[in-house]
Image: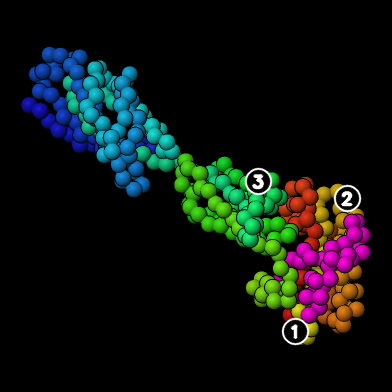
Amino acid sequence: MSKKIWVRHSVAAACLLVCLASVHGALAASNDTATGTFSAAVYDAATEAPLEGARVTVGDTTVTTNASGRTGEIDVEGSPYTVTVTLSPFEEYTKSFATEPGARIFAAIGLTRPSFGAVSITVVDASSSKPIAGALVEIRGSDTESSEFGAASFAEVRNGPVSVWASHADYESSSGQGVVVGGETLELRVEIGPRKEDVETLAAGLALEGFIDLYGIHFEAGTDSILSASDPTLNALAELMRRAPDARYLLVGHTASGGDETDHQRLSERQVQAVIRWLIGAGIVESRLDAEGRGGSEPIAAFDSESAQALNRRIELVLVE
């Protein structure tokens, strides 16, 4: 008399539903090496969609699933035997079957994806679409720099939604969003536009965050001598302060990181004081202004490249009240 047994269990990267139909007991008893069969339906464990093209190996025989995710019946002799299912980017499924002689087994195998995927980013100029080299690219607390082709990549990023931020001293920071899928590469394009440090932009930044990093104030290398290229940002800064006559501000000087910390600290103090003097000369009341120098102790980028250090060199404007 034949029998049918349903068993449900999970193994590593798969959920297996097995239907076992044994042959007549007397036949099994008389022929322990009777040929049995194995067939499978392979699907995505997350979506339950059938998976075409999965390679199912039973002993020395390998077949490929059809558009419905199914195989035909594969002859098997002896027990136990091992079944392996592979399909990129899913995790490999392997299970050993110990069955009665002549048994016919059908398995519904759900494949799962790895917990990590990759992210590939291209950083470009928002206007020209030209690649931007040396941009700081950040994702979930990890960062890297874009290449000369504007490319940056992260090899192991946990599955789920991600935001990627790109920053550059000459550009406004911007982000791109996507969803990381295990075993796959998420490709993102992040467009960043030229940095603006006019009155409206400064006011909006202070209103949103309470502080803003200024990159348009330039000094002669290693000195506190302000270059004329700084005039647009300094004029905007002075006008911002005139429009809010009761507000007080803290200006913080930051230098490149690395090297002699004492020298960086002193340089940052001299440079921020030079900015204070410029503002006082432009008519801003001294009592509204405080200054600090922090050297290279608070870098934005941890790299030694010139573009990274350019992000670290800045004057931070903080709204006190």
Counting from the top left corner in percent of width and height, residue 301 is at 72, 53
Q: Relative to residue 64, is residue 244 drawn left or right?
A: right
Counting from the top left corner in percent of width and height, residue 11 is at 35, 35
Identity, as a three-letter code, of the amino acid under mark 1:
Ala
Residue on which disc 3 sits: 149
Residue on which disc 2 sits: 260
Viewer-side residue, 67 vs 139: 67
Residue on which disc 1 sits: 244
Q: Earlier in the sequence, mark 2 or mark 1?
A: 1
Mark 2, residues whose alpha carbon is within 10 Å: few (<14), some, or many (≥20)?
few
Viewer-side residue, 284 vs 94: 284
Q: Relative to residue 61, is residue 106 drawn left or right?
A: left
Q: Earlier in the sequence, mark 1 or mark 3?
A: 3
Q: Is residue 240 above or below residue 18?
A: below
Image quadrant containing the C terminus: bottom right
Instruction: Kindly report which numbered mark, 1 or 3, lies closer to the viewer in this rendering.
Output: 3
**Looking at the image, can residue 91 be seen?**
no
The secondary element bearing badge 2 is classed as loop
